[in-house]
Image: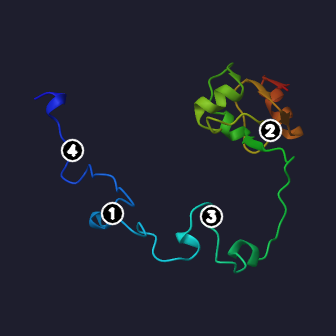
């Protein structure tokens, strides 16, 4: 058996519809468009949301809320999450991604908060720190460096 002998399942490859090629083809005369009307005409096709001139659904429904396009997304990491790293290691965005604490594609800011305890000295590089987190990191013998 080789690739040249392989065939798709029955009905996988259908011949294309040849529209408007005579009555005996089954797709002659109106070529599957029916009689008259907007959809029978040539030219611009209707969009999926067109409702025949009726007020479209997306315009009938009420709009509410506001999405701030300038909002800064900040990931939050707690001290208890940092306790899994080895003593003396450097904790930055790449390390957090590898540990699964931050999404793989995340590329923004992250802040360290003081929830939990830190028992190992670590060098933590983050966008921001809470006061409690900074004190806890320094008390454990580590460093808290603000990056970017």
Q: Is residue 75 left or right of residue 69?
A: left
Q: CA distance from mark 2 to mark 3?
A: 45 Å
Is label 3 or label 1 in front? 1
Q: CA distance from mark 3 to mark 1?
A: 29 Å
Is label 3 or label 4 in front? 3
Q: Which numbered marker is on residue 111?
A: 2
Q: Nearer the viewer, residue 28 or 4?
A: 28
Is label 2 or label 3 in front? 3
Return the disc, 4 or 2, that comes first in the chain's sequence. Answer: 4
Q: Nearer the viewer, residue 30 or 2?
A: 30
Secondary structure beneath disc 3? Answer: loop
Q: Which residue is mark 4?
A: 8
Q: CA distance from mark 4 to mark 2?
A: 55 Å
Colour setting: rainbow
Q: State the image coordinates of residue 34 (x, y, percent, origin top left).
A: 45, 75
Q: Is residue 6 left or right of residue 137?
A: left
Q: Is residue 73 left or right of residue 7?
A: right
Q: Which numbered marker is on residue 22?
A: 1
Is label 4 or label 2 in front? 4
Q: State the image coordinates of residue 43 (x, y, percent, origin top left).
A: 61, 60
At label 3, counting other C-alpha atoms closer than 10 Å, the crowd grade (few under 14, some 14-19, many 20 or more) is: few
Return the disc, 4 or 1, that comes first in the chain's sequence. Answer: 4
Q: CA distance from mark 4 to mark 1?
A: 31 Å
* Residue placed furthest toward the left: 1
Q: Are marks 4 and 2 in contact (CB under 8 Å)?
A: no
At label 2, counting other C-alpha atoms closer than 10 Å, the crowd grade (few under 14, some 14-19, many 20 or more) is: some
């Amino acid at each position: 058996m080789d690739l040249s002998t392989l065939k798709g399942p029955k009905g996988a490859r259908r011949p294309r519809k040849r529209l408007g090629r005579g009555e005996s083809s089954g797709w002659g005369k109106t070529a599957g468009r029916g009689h008259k009307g907007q959809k029978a005409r040539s030219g611009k096709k209707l969009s999926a949301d067109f409702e025949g001139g009726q007020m479209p659904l997306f315009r009938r429904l009420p709009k509410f809320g506001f999405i701030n396009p300038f909002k800064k997304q900040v990931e939050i990491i707690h001290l208890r999450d940092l306790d899994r790293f080895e003593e003396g290691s450097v904790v930055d965005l790449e390390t957090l991604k590898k540990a699964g604490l931050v999404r793989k594609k995340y590329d923004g800011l992250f802040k360290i908060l003081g929830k939990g305890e830190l028992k190992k000295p670590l060098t933590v590089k983050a966008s921001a720190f809470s006061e409690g987190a900074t004190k806890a990191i320094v008390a454990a013998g580590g460093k808290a460096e603000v990056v970017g």
